[in-house]
Image (cartoon, coloured by chain):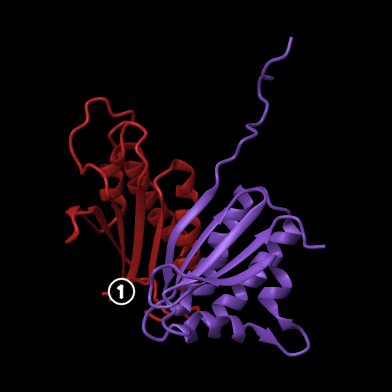
Amino acid sequence: MSGPIVGEPEQTRERTVVTRLRVANALLRPVLSRVVSMVLTRADWPLDRMEEALLVCDALCAHAPACAPAELPTFSVQADEDQAELFVSDLGAGGAERLLADCTLPLVGNVLERLADSVGLESDGGEGPRLAVALKSASPS
Amino acid sequence: MTPDMELALPARAENIAIVRHALGAFAEAYAISESKLSDIRLAVTEACANVVVHAYPDGEEGEMEVLASMQDGELIVRVRDWGHGIRPRPDSPGLGLGLSLIAALAETVQLGQDEQEHTEVMMTFSLEDEPPSMNGAGS
């Protein structure tokens, strides 16, 4: 006879979504990193990959304010146990392209492209495209 | 006025933890004491729980929005939803203590609707004994 085992953990996990996060520039790094940590923890991400996701956040926090001179950039996050996506929008014309370019370190290259599984610009119906960064919970081979 | 922090999420119970963590980071940046932060977190948790339980009945999906601003030595937190507004609910699953608790913890509480007809709970927390702008955060 087969059936659910009492106390067995729920196998299906809903995708965790943060629809919109806008934070004053001075508060951006602490707030975004805490929110992303919480979202990935709930999605059962391994610690090493979570740290890499937080490095992505650090890079975005360091450069996004300068790429959105007119208003605060807007972040949104969604994650499940396999993949997380981080979007940065409201960057204005050319802002997303500049943000991607600014996340480059000498001798390292583009931090986003090194750490994430995919990085791209996509339209969100706003003035300019948004930057989309996707990471998988398993490290890229 | 642009809030210092604006956070929007689906109105689900598990998302209240994200709000609490975001407030924790916000408070750390402003060097708000742990005891004051506990009061703020508890009051905001109650306001968010009200959204989760009451704003979108019958399994309806909706969002909650939390806005925090530091202004003249006060932390102003607004918790908003797009639901059915504040009204008596005889079948309420709670003890009915949420708003009383918020009123006890915050300096002021205002219930109502904002200009876009969101249901809104606005809480003010005095930080007069807690100088802002200590950890590099501007006000």
Percent x, y of residue B48: 36, 47
Residue found at x 47% / y 85%: A94
Circle 1 packing at 10 Å, graded few (<14), some (14-19), many (20+), is few
Percent x, y of residue A8: 68, 26
Left or right: residue A61 versus residue A4 is: left
Q: Give the labeled residue for mark 1.
A: B2
Q: Could you tell me which secondary element the residue under label 1 belongs to? A: loop
Viewer-closest of B69 and A43:
A43
Percent x, y of residue B70: 33, 72
Total marks placed: 1
Q: Which chain is red?
A: B
Chain of residue at mark 1: B
Q: Image height check: is A26 above or below B59?
A: below
The quarter of the displayed image where residue B101 is located: top left
Residue found at x 24% / y 53%: B120
Q: Which chain is purple?
A: A
Left or right: residue A1 versus residue A77 is: right
Percent x, y of residue A74: 44, 70
Quarter occupied by the N terminus of chain B? bottom left
Name the amino acid type tagged 1.
Answer: Thr
The quarter of the displayed image where residue B90 is located: top left
Which residue extends farthest right?
A: A141
Viewer-closest of B24 and A29:
A29
| Residue B127 seen in the figure | no
